[in-house]
Image (cartoon, rainbow, N blue to C red):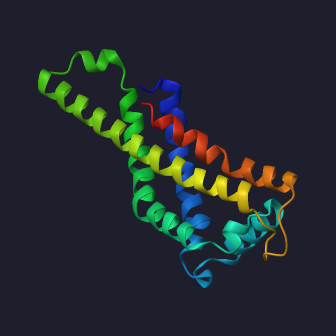
Amino acid sequence: MLTPLELSFYTYYSLLHIPITLCIDSTVVLPWRWFPRWVQAAVRWHVAQNHDYLLDDPPWWLVLFVAVELLVQLPLFCYFAWQLPRLRRPASVAAGDDKLLKGARRRQHRRVLALLRGYGANASLTTLVCIVHICRWGHVVGGAGALSPAQKLQLVAVYLPTFVIPLRLCFV
């Protein structure tokens, strides 16, 4: 079960991930020319600043992960942004509802929680694969040598929130 604070957090998390998915992550699977210059500049800056060789030259499995993100997770972000605030409905309002409405609300609540768990499992697992790849095979953008331990740590720190935050959802 999510607390009211967590419901708010995951609502904003979902809202924030819509532009991140559309502007940053989607560059892995969509043609570069489709993106405005400011998006291209932001991605180039991120790759250079954080040594993100995965975003610069994505392996086949990352392309697959991002395709799933666009096809499954992006619609879920919209759905969660819409549904999570509804789960915070005050008990005083819900107390006056008839049995049929309460049953529908309970079923909707269970559906949202099941989708959150599915999203959490998918997002945390795919990010974990990225983190393991960085730790084991991390290399400099362009492939000219290995990342230093400090560079690996910096890049893992960028990916870590997208592992930990969805992982929490596996346990709702």
Q: For this rendering, which residue is in front, 30 or 157?
A: 157
Q: Quadrant of residue 139?
A: bottom right
> From the viewer's perspective, is 147 left or right of 107?
right
Q: For this rendering, which residue is in front, 154 or 78?
A: 154
Residue 167: x, y in percent? Answer: 53, 39
Question: What residue is rendered at 67% in x and 68% in y?
Answer: 55
Q: For this rendering, which residue is in front, 12 or 21?
A: 21
Question: What residue is rendered at 37% in x and 20% in y?
Answer: 90
Question: What residue is rendered at 26% in x and 36% in y?
Answer: 108
Q: Is residue 129 above or below residue 169?
A: below
Question: What residue is rendered at 57% in x and 40% in y?
Answer: 165
Q: Is residue 10 above or below residue 52?
A: above
Which residue is farthest front?
Answer: 136
Q: Is residue 120 above or below residue 23?
A: above
> Which quadrant is home to the N terminus?
top left
> Which quadrant is home to the C terminus?
top left
> From the viewer's perspective, is 26 left or right of 146?
left
Residue 51: x, y in percent? Answer: 80, 63
Q: How many marks?
A: 0
Residue 66: x, y in percent? Answer: 52, 65
Q: Is residue 52 above or below residue 76?
A: below
Residue 159: x, y in percent? Answer: 67, 51
